[in-house]
């Protein structure tokens, strides 16, 4: 497809039908990772740099937005330089510059998006703004030949959605959480049992050592393809309290919680893919790194579905997925004046 940005006279040819080689440099800074990547033709990563702030926020038990924004400022130039170095490319080789517009922390997004706009203006190349959630989905195009249509389960720190991906540009959210996102539930339960931030991956590790049948926990009962995880979180709180601080069976609690969450998610994903008659399912987002969710989704291969999940490093926040999203033009913005946004519009 042809794209022409408002400020640049250059026309950029990108997208699934494009035959010329393209290199998109992307920047991601929506939360606590400052990332820069260069991706060739939407699928081949030639540079992927991520500066994580986990160590900074660990002592606070969560991300502090002001501190995160300042750390992005410190890291942004470094990750861009490293991406050029890793790829061996120079700015003149870049077809377009892409950056995350939202949703995310406003102060954090501003750093990355302004850096992206500046690169585009200075080098007189097109600018492409990207929606962070769409970018997570597009992580599935990296290193694969995946093409729509498919059914997607997007599970991150802020979102839990089932998305019907009919084509590169037509995506419909057909279900979502009515309260907590899965990643949020993981992080809250992890905090309840005393695990440090970020709790999700730590809880996942302990769950692998526990008995998933030790405790019966309630699945949120919601209509259609929607989800609810706040009841489950309260049930875990009650369970933890019932031990009164004594000999808490942490591994079994983690395993039982993980079993309940993964069962609920995959049940609805399966229902959705069956009803739409698609042959492909994908998972995406930070929580797609979860061992049990991955296992249960990949079990759908035994029922004849093609299953895709991004490599672990492309599940959590990274800029390669942003570049891929810009390339396939799924829900992007090409106005250089586009403003950051904190929540899904
Ligand atoms: O997608 P992401 O990097 O950020 C958002 O866009 O929200 O996801 C971060 C979330 C956090 O809640 C983190 O605890 C969770 O993903 N997460 C996991 C695992 N790895 C990351 N949750 C469960 N199991 C994991 N292995
Ligand atoms: Zn994310």
Image (cartoon, helix red, strand yellow):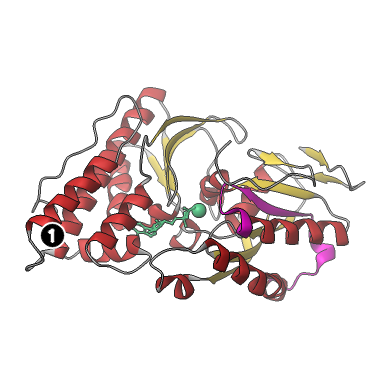
- Could you say where residue 64 lies in the image, as x and y percent from the top left? 49, 64
Disc 1: CA contacts within 10 A as few (<14), some (14-19) or many (>=20): many
Given residues 340 and 98, the one toward you in this image is: 340
Q: Quadrant of the N terminus?
A: top right
Q: Left of 248 or right of it: where is 65?
A: right
Residue at x 42% of width, y 52% of height: 157
Given residues 291 and 175, the one toward you in this image is: 175
Residue at x 35% of width, y 47% of height: 182
Specify the segment rendered in magenta: 87-108
Element under disc 1: helix
Given residues 101 and 241, the one toward you in this image is: 241
One can see residue 42 in this view: no
Vertical relation: 253 (above or below) 166: below
Is the C-beta of the residue carrying label 1 under 8 Å from the nearest atom of ligand 1? no
State the residue lying farthest toward the right.
9
Q: Which residue is mark 1?
A: 252
* 98 falls in the magenta region: yes
Quadrant of ligand 1: it is bottom left
Given residues 274 and 330, the one toward you in this image is: 330
Residue at x 68% of width, y 41% of height: 332
Q: Quadrant of the C terminus?
A: top right
Q: Left of 113 or right of it: where is 49?
A: left
- Could you say where residue 61 lies in the image, as x and y percent from the top left? 38, 67
Q: Left of 140 or right of it: where is 327?
A: right
Q: Quadrant of residue 15?
A: top right
Q: Left of 235 or right of it: where is 302?
A: right
Question: How many numbered discs sit on the rendered protein?
Answer: 1
């Amino acid at each position: 497809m042809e794209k022409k940005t408002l400020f640049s006279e250059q026309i950029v040819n990108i997208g699934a039908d494009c035959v010329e080689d393209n290199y998109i440099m992307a920047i991601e800074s929506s939360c606590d990772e400052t990332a820069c990547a260069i991706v060739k033709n939407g699928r081949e990563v030639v540079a992927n740099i991520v500066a994580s702030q986990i160590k900074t926020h660990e002592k606070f038990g969560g991300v502090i937005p002001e501190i995160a924004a300042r750390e992005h400022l410190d890291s942004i130039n470094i990750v861009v330089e490293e991406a050029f170095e890793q790829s061996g490319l120079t700015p003149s080789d870049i077809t377009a510059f892409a950056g995350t517009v939202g949703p995310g922390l406003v102060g954090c997004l501003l750093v990355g998006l302004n850096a992206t706009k500046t690169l585009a203006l200075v080098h007189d190349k097109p600018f492409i703004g990207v929606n962070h959630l769409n970018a997570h989905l597009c992580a599935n195009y990296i290193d694969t030949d995946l093409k729509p249509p498919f059914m997607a389960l997007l599970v991150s720190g802020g979102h839990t959605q089932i998305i019907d991906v009919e084509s590169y540009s037509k995506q419909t959210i057909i279900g979502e959480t009515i309260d907590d996102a899965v990643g949020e539930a993981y992080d809250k339960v992890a905090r309840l049992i005393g695990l440090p931030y970020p709790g999700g991956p730590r809880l996942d590790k302990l769950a692998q050592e526990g008995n998933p049948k030790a405790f019966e926990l309630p699945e949120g009962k919601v209509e259609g393809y929607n989800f609810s995880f706040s009841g489950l979180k309260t049930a875990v709180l009650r369970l933890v309290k019932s031990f009164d601080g004594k000999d808490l069976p942490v591994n079994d609690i983690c395993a039982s919680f993980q079993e309940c969450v993964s069962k609920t998610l995959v049940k609805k994903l399966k229902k959705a893919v069956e009803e739409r008659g698609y042959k492909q399912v994908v998972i995406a987002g930070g929580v797609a790194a979860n061992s049990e969710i991955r296992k249960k989704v990949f079990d759908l291969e035994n029922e004849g579905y093609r299953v895709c999940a991004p490599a672990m490093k492309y599940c959590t926040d990274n800029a390669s997925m942003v570049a891929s999203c810009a390339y396939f033009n799924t829900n992007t913005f090409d106005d250089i004046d586009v403003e950051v946004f904190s929540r899904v519009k």
